[in-house]
Image (cartoon, coloured by chain):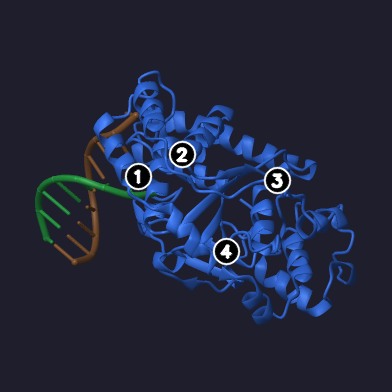
Chain colours: A blue, B green, C brown
DNA sequence: CCCAGGGA
DNA sequence: TCCCTGGGG
């Protein structure tokens, strides 16, 4: 999930209207995980068609993007490429955690503890290659641009924001700040309710905007120092130091300015310091993409969802009609003036 | 995730 | 009008 420095970051609550006419680069994996973990039936299993194939990702993409486009937002989805080898450890840990959650889920189902089963089911969420392929196909049909990052999707999205190709990145974690995204939108949804893993029921969430420069200035850090702080805490690419969270890390870096000047220089958990720094400060990116929002392929969407996946034809037709009523052309020309 | 529907 | 619940595939 990336490094959690939420506690020391100031966010501004914003209204969706403030994103109208703006291009937002969305961390695709992050968004898809939300869909697949949140869109479930009562026993926790994802929604699926008659053949048992999952459909949560498709429902999520259809409805979320319909609402975003209606609000005037111009979304572009950035998918992860091949993970950096320093991420292998994190990925392995996630796999193990999912396996554990799966066996606990089965236990909870046997004990008929549905509430626990539901929350465990959310932790078993996996994105398969087929779901990724279907997601990009769905985006194409909706006329929404997407691209594959060479490595980390958040790094690519952040590069695009730095270059001014998009106004902001959208992700739930704070790695986009480390990657240098000037603005990060969190909780990019139209509804303000969210199911959270580990808890039953819903909690309120508000659309938030995180401004990188503002936060760096307020904390008295350079971005390089913020990256060092994250490395002390632990990132997807290194373990970090046990017992050091955002508060202590901030104090340490404000006192010593860089990891080499602290007592933690060379400590286990901080191996390959310069490589990890470079992952955040000089990330791999591509400029080989085009941002164009096209008219939706109405028949294509109906075929895909209703013929291939047995969605209700009337529901989908209604969504498609709403989609066709949106004038993305004028939003794109409006966007030039912002 | 988002929506529709019903009750407070 | 808000809040909660059930449904979607």
Query: Which residue was labeled with disc 3?
Result: A288
Marks 1 and 4, how far apart in space?
A: 25 Å
- Whole-percent x, y for residue A282 in the image: 80, 57
Q: Chain of mark 2?
A: A
The residue depicted at 35 percent of the width and 56 percent of the height is A191
- Tag 3, which secondary structure? loop
Q: Is residue A126 visible?
A: no
User: Do marks 3 and 1 share a chain?
Assistant: yes
Asked if residue A146 is positioned above or below residue A297 in the image, the reply reads below
The picture quadrant where one finds residue A243 is bottom right
Query: Which residue was labeled with disc 1?
Result: A324
- Tag 4, which secondary structure? loop
Q: Is residue A280 visible?
A: yes
The residue depicted at 45 percent of the width and 54 percent of the height is A329
Mark closer to the chain start, 4 or 2? 2
- Whole-percent x, y for residue A318 in the image: 27, 40
Query: Which residue was labeled with disc 2?
Result: A36
Query: Which disc number belongs to residue A167?
Result: 4
Neighbor class of circle 4 (other Cα within 10 Å; few <14, some 14-19, many 20+) is many
Mark closer to the chain start, 3 or 4? 4
Mark closer to the chain start, 1 or 4? 4
Circles 1 and 2, Cβ within 8 Å, touching? The answer is no
Q: Nearer the viewer, mark 1 or mark 2?
A: 1
Mark closer to the chain start, 3 or 1? 3
Front residue (pair A148, A246): A148
Neighbor class of circle 1 (other Cα within 10 Å; few <14, some 14-19, many 20+) is some
The picture quadrant where one finds residue A24 is bottom right
- Whole-percent x, y for residue A42 in the image: 32, 36
Q: Chain of mark 3?
A: A
Marks 3 and 4, how far apart in space?
A: 18 Å
- Whole-percent x, y for residue A136 in the image: 54, 36
């Amino acid at each position: 999930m990336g490094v959690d420095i939420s506690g020391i970051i100031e966010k501004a609550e914003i209204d969706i209207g403030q994103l109208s006419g703006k291009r937002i680069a969305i961390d695709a994996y992050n968004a898809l995980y939300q869909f697949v973990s949140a869109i479930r039936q009562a026993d926790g299993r994802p929604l699926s068609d008659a053949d048992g194939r999952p459909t949560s990702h498709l429902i999520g993409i259809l409805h979320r993007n319909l609402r975003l486009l209606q609000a005037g937002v111009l979304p572009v989805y950035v998918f992860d490429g091949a993970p950096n080898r320093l991420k292998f450890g994190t990925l392995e840990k996630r796999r193990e955690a999912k396996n554990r959650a799966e066996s606990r889920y089965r236990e909870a189902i046997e004990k008929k503890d549905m509430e626990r089963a539901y929350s465990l089911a959310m932790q078993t969420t996996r994105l398969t290659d087929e779901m990724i392929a279907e997601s990009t196909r769905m985006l194409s049909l909706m006329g929404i641009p997407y691209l594959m990052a060479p490595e980390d999707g958040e790094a690519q999205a952040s590069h695009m924001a730095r270059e001014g190709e998009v106004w902001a990145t959208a992700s739930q974690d704070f790695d986009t700040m480390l990657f240098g995204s000037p603005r990060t939108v969190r909780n990019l949804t139209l509804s303000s309710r969210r199911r959270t893993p580990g808890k039953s029921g819903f909690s309120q969430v508000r659309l938030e905007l995180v401004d990188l420069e503002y936060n760096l200035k307020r904390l008295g850090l350079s971005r390089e120092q913020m990256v060092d702080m994250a490395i002390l805490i632990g990132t997807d690419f290194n373990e970090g130091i046990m017992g050091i969270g955002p508060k202590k890390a901030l104090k340490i870096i404000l006192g010593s300015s860089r990891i080499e000047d602290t007592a933690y220089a060379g400590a286990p958990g901080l191996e390959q310091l310069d490589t990890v720094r470079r992952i955040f400060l000089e990330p791999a990116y591509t400029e080989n993409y085009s941002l164009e929002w096209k008219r939706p392929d109405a028949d294509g969407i109906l075929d895909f969802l209703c013929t291939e996946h047995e969605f209700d034809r009337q529901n989908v037709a209604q969504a498609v009609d709403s989609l066709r009523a949106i004038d993305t052309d004028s939003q794109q020309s409006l966007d030039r003036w912002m």
